[in-house]
Amino acid sequence: MFRSTDLITLAGASTLSIVGAATAADGTVDMAAQIAELRAANEALAAKVARLEQESGGEQWLTEARAAEIRAIVTDVLADADTRTSMQSSGATAGWNKDQGGFFIASPSGDFKLNIKGQIQFRWAFNDRDTDSAGTDAKTDVWGFENRRTKLTFTGFVVDPSWTYEVKPVFNRAPASLTTGDQTFSSGNIVGSVEDIWVQKDFGQGTLLKMGQFKAPFLREELVSSSSQLAVERSLVNDVYSTKFSQGVQLEHTDGSLRGQLFYGDGLRANATSITSSATTNAGGFSGGYTTGFNSNPTNWAFAGRIEWLGQGQWKQFRDLTSFRGEEKGWMLGFGAMGQSIRPANEGPVSASTTDSMWGVTADFTYDFGGANLFAYGVYRHVQLAGEVATRGGGSSDDLKQFGVVVQGGVFVSDEVELYARYEWGNTDTDKYRTGGGGVAERELDSIATVGMNWYIGGNKDLKWSNDFGFAFDPVGDFNSSGADWLSDVNSNANRTNDGQWVVRSQIQLLF
């Protein structure tokens, strides 16, 4: 290997030769002999240098060494620049990674990460109801814009990736009264609340323990995010029977193609479980344990759980209710159950019509065709009252036998456009208790067909424009939901049924 010390040695030898020659010139040695000796020394030196250059590849070693030094210097400078740009002397990283939760900030040691995501749903809706009944002046047609959902989601981990968390503040509509002249309108104030607030520990081998506020595991349609639905909005069957958010703990275990979840906590929300004798009033609901204090737990106990079987595909593809072209085919079967015992607000006896307890079961099936999808489920709920309550025809009863069915499917007609259809049917079993008003009320049924289309603009799943049309074959009563743009049919005359309500919805959704 050619080294710099070799050059020094050669230079030294040359110098000594020259000095020796000069000294001899002062002596009596023949000048010609001295010149011959110097020439021989120079030729020997030149030959050695040539040989060393040949062995070391000429001057290439100098070029490679310099290039390596330059690369090292540039790498150090860029690393220092990244550190200073992030304003983190510790070397924290930040950026955007769609597959890992969107925007993120993470520590270089791997013990901290924060992901930030967001959802915006802006909607225009038109609702038409048959209000041609005696004694009412309600408007037949209503329409307008609304910020249906605005959410921020903060997820990540602390200590190590096995300790994860989620906090999701939301900004939804809050109905308020606005009076202008002699007219009163419903206005909307944007207010903040929090949906998901939880911490989760991954024990490995598919076992997770979640603690905090989140959706109890029951109806699959509710468990799929509002950002990943097929239609503009979830069905009214889901709105009545879903348990929504509650506070508690959940144990989950996944073993290959089988996954189970068990929840214990505060009350589970349940709409249309409070009966009424009025022929013109919809059934009430149970709010559950959403953002309540420990001393406000509305139940003696509350449980919910699901078991899911993955027949084909991967778990992650069933986080939504659609199937894009090119995606893997797969199917999944799920079963859920819930039950709770209601705690009275005050000590002492309660009225017979008070809701005492309830339990429910559901089964669902999902199939992804890779460009088309099918989803169907059924749900049954039994509500127990505190005592016997009078019914039509002079009899009595102490319970409600409620059920619902949803079937929907979609198909991509191009890489960006998806067509879909849905039919839902349900019964809250409340009309038998509507003995007042001197007529026969019809407020317990749900029968709605919906057709629509999704346009994933530019083929991007994060930007979707959805449009659909829905028609109700029965009067909308217990199943009404202003969040889904279905309003209660006006029915001041108990002998009249107001069917034929229809809704048009157009929504733009942006995920970031």
Image (cartoon, rainbow, N blue to C red):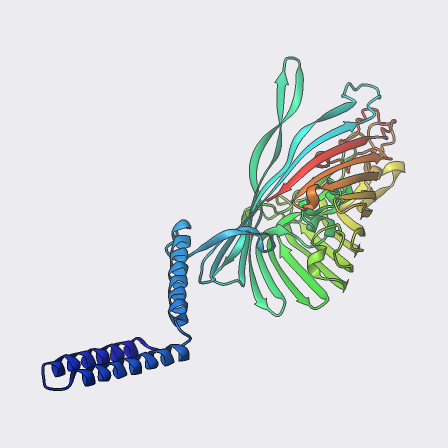
For the N terminus, give its image quadrant.
bottom left
Q: In the figure, is residue 428 to the left or right of 511?
A: right
Position of 218 relative to 65 (above/below): above
Up the image or down, 430 lies above or below 183; here it is below
Q: Quadrant of residue 445?
A: top right
Residue furthest left in the image = 27
Q: Residue furthest top?
A: 181
**x%, y% of residue 322?**
75, 50
Q: Is residue 393 above or below residue 136?
A: below
Above or below, 145 against 237 in this view is: above
| Point 39% across, 71% down: residue | 59
> What is the tally of numbered marks visible in this picture?
0
Q: Residue 122: x percent and y percent?
A: 65, 34
Observer able to see residue 360: yes
Q: Quadrant of residue 391?
A: top right
Q: Position of residue 446 (x, y in %)?
A: 83, 39
Name the side, left or right, on which 266 lies relative to 86. right
